[in-house]
Image: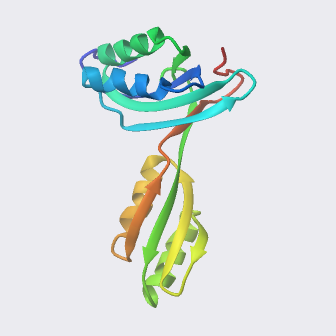
Amino acid sequence: MADDPGQFRSATIAVLVENEAGVLARVIGLFSGRGYNIESLTVAPVDADRRLSRITIVTSGTEMVIEQIKAQLDRLVPVHKVSDLSLAGPHLVRELALIKVVGLGDHRVEALRLADAFRARVVDATTESFVFEMTGTAEKIDAFCDLMRPIGLAEVSRTGAVAIVRGRSALTV
């Protein structure tokens, strides 16, 4: 928890919900209706037998605002569990990005050298471009994109954050 309740902090919130039409719209409506910001949002089915999906939301605010967000999420009908992974202990947060770089000659060589240093994988190549696949923290992907910008960064597509607590603990119903 933040030392100063008025201090802003980032929160990575995992939400287990029923996998049914309209659930994501209700979650987004909760944020937009109250003026809360969503910095990243991912959603995918995680248990087909029980028809559950997991939504991972990265947001920021004061401790009071984040507690309000969690409480309001917990009151939504299709929500089974809400967990602030930022407070749950050690956790992993990753994104996937596809990054297109266009260039010729030395720019291509430099793009490949940087990709190797960042452990980005070439998933498509033409005589004038590369598409790199990269996983990592948002900061790592941002740093890679910043270095690719002068080389010929043309396009970026990112998944948003996915997160999980380390160790034996699990987000379950």
Please tell me which residue lies in front, 5 or 173: 173
Query: Is residue 123 placed above or below 55 in the rendered structure?
Result: below
Q: Is residue 125 left or right of residue 104?
A: right
Query: Is residue 133 placed above or below 67 in the rendered structure?
Result: below
Q: Which residue lies at the image location 28% right of the left edge and 14% below the top edge?
A: 5
Quadrant showing the C terminus: top right
How far across and how far down the image is residue 105, in percent?
Answer: 46, 91
Residue 164's quadrant in the figure? top right
Please tell me which residue lies in front, 135 or 127: 127
Is residue 17 visible in the rendered image? The answer is yes
Query: Is residue 106 placed above or below 171 in the rendered structure?
Result: below
Residue 43's quadrant in the figure? top right
Q: Is residue 71 left or right of residue 165?
A: left
Q: Which residue lies at the image location 42% right of the left edge and 61% below the top edge?
A: 156
How far across and how far down the image is residue 23, in percent?
Answer: 49, 24
Query: Which residue of the protein is positioned furthest toward the bottom in this rendering?
Result: 105
How far across and how far down the image is residue 42, in percent?
Answer: 50, 37
Query: Is residue 51 placed above or below 133 in the rendered structure?
Result: above
Query: Which residue of the protein is positioned furthest toward the front in this rendering?
Result: 21
Residue 91's quadrant in the figure? top right
Q: Which residue lies at the image location 61% right of the left edge and 69% below the top edge?
A: 123
How far across and how far down the image is residue 94, in percent?
Answer: 54, 44
